[in-house]
């Protein structure tokens, strides 16, 4: 069994097929941009940071296999490849941010080295490969900032509730919200983690529960419908969730069901944190109302593992994400640069970038 969602060595990329977890650990070879697109679209790889890394690595893999006559044709290939990857899944912004960055990087490299396509290729591959270490480093920082803040605010030992999967399987390693839980456990400050089942795709019961058991972190699984009862009957110290896209005002799109967790947390005075790298922030959007929300096929709701569970003939609505208004993110947004109030996030990140 493995917690490595992404295996990459010497230009070869393999992704853990998360559709088969927790029963089987099977790796699929990703040899082309189209393979990367399919792995993302079918959710063999999922989680905002992992989607961006696999998408970009699929470009790096194909770049290394191809011969280009001109630097301009390298740049064209990068631009076309990322444009295709943008159509895989619409909500998580990390892949879009990576696409913008690498497309403009390729154009400027081609301009600087018009006669040297190999140089342009190798510079791009090197930068894309650097995403892996950067993600791991950022997640460790998020874990450190988040665990310190929760420990200070809530007094150990803590009981933390999380939603969906934001761990090693959703990133290059360690995780964001689950990284905060891992860091609390490493510091011996965690009494228990609670994870929701996360219907309809069950990222909580299939993936987060798998990671928690794998790391021997004391943990309890609950159905999504038990969240308010949990807050009413157990003393929950904090809720920590991930993000797929955070708008400038702090409104946050994350896995469907996050919004109702935030409402329940507000009612029960439980601090609610979002943990995400700055690559999950979309400074182009004013508010969550502008975030595109992916709708998944009805079958994910109507059936489980191919077995129909819903009454024949029923219609269904299956949005994959919802938007939690900034005012409900009462604990703050935990990034690799520190914890910020949602309303201050955009300003703070701009000043870090300056
Ligand atoms: O549909 P998914 O499984 O890709 O959704 C994942 C989530 O919503 C995660 O919370 C988010 O991407 C953050 S992962 C570090």
Image: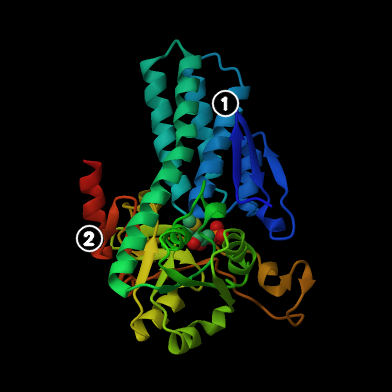
Vertical arrangement, residue 297 with respect to residue 3, above or below: below
Please name whichever residue, 67 or 46, is drawn nearer the observer in this view of the structure.
Answer: 46
Q: Is mark 2 within 8 Å of ligand 1?
A: no
How packed mark 1 is, by other alpha carbons closer than 10 Å (few <14, some 14-19, many 20 or more), is many
Residue 27 pos. (x, y %): 70, 45
How packed mark 2 is, by other alpha carbons closer than 10 Å (few <14, some 14-19, many 20 or more), is some
Mark found first going from the N terminus, 2 or 1: 1
Please name whichever residue, 182 or 38, is drawn nearer the observer in this view of the structure.
Answer: 182
How has the structure been colored for display?
Answer: rainbow
Vertical arrangement, residue 94 with respect to residue 260, above or below: above
User: For residue 63, which numbered disc appears in the image?
Assistant: 1
Residue 88 pos. (x, y %): 57, 49
Q: Is residue 4 left or right of residue 254?
A: right
Answer yes or no: is residue 16 visible: yes
Please name whichever residue, 110 or 20, is drawn nearer the observer in this view of the structure.
Answer: 20
Which one is in front in this view, the residue at disc 2 or the one at disc 1?
2
Q: Secondary structure at mark 2?
A: helix
């Amino acid at each position: 069994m493995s917690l490595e969602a992404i295996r990459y060595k010497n230009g070869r990329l393999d992704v853990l097929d998360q559709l088969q977890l927790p029963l089987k650990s099977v790796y699929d070879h990703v040899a082309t941009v189209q393979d990367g697109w399919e792995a993302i679209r079918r959710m063999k790889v999922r989680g905002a940071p992992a989607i961006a890394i696999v998408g970009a690595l699929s470009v790096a893999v194909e770049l290394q296999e191809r011969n280009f006559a001109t630097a301009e044709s390298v740049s064209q290939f990068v631009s076309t490849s990322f444009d295709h990857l943008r159509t895989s899944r619409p909500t998580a912004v990390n892949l879009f941010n990576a696409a913008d960055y690498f497309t403009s990087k390729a154009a400027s490299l081609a301009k600087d080295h018009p006669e040297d396509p190999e140089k342009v290729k190798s510079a791009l591959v090197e930068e894309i490969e650097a995403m892996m270490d950067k993600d791991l480093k950022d997640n460790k920082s998020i874990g450190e900032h988040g665990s310190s803040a929760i420990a200070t605010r809530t007094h150990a030992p803590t009981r933390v509730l999380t939603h969906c999967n934001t761990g090693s399987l959703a990133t290059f390693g360690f995780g964001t919200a689950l990284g905060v839980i891992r860091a609390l456990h490493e510091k011996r400050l965690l009494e228990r983690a609670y994870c929701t089942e996360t219907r309809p795709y069950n990222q909580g019961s299939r993936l987060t529960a798998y990671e928690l058991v794998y790391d021997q972190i004391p943990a309890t699984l609950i159905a999504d419908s038990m969240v308010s009862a949990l807050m009413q009957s157990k003393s929950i110290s904090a809720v920590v969730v991930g993000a797929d896209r955070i708008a400038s005002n702090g409104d946050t799109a994350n896995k469907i069901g996050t919004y109702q967790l935030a409402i329940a947390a507000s009612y029960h005075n439980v601090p609610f944190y979002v943990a995400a790298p700055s690559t999950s922030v979309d400074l182009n959007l004013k508010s969550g109302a502008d975030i595109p929300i992916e709708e998944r096929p009805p079958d994910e709701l109507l059936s489980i593992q191919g077995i129909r569970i819903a009454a024949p003939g029923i219609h269904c609505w299956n949005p994959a994400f919802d938007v939690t208004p900034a005012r409900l993110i009462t604990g703050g947004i935990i990034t690799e640069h520190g914890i910020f109030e949602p309303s201050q996030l955009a300003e703070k990140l701009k000043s870090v970038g300056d």
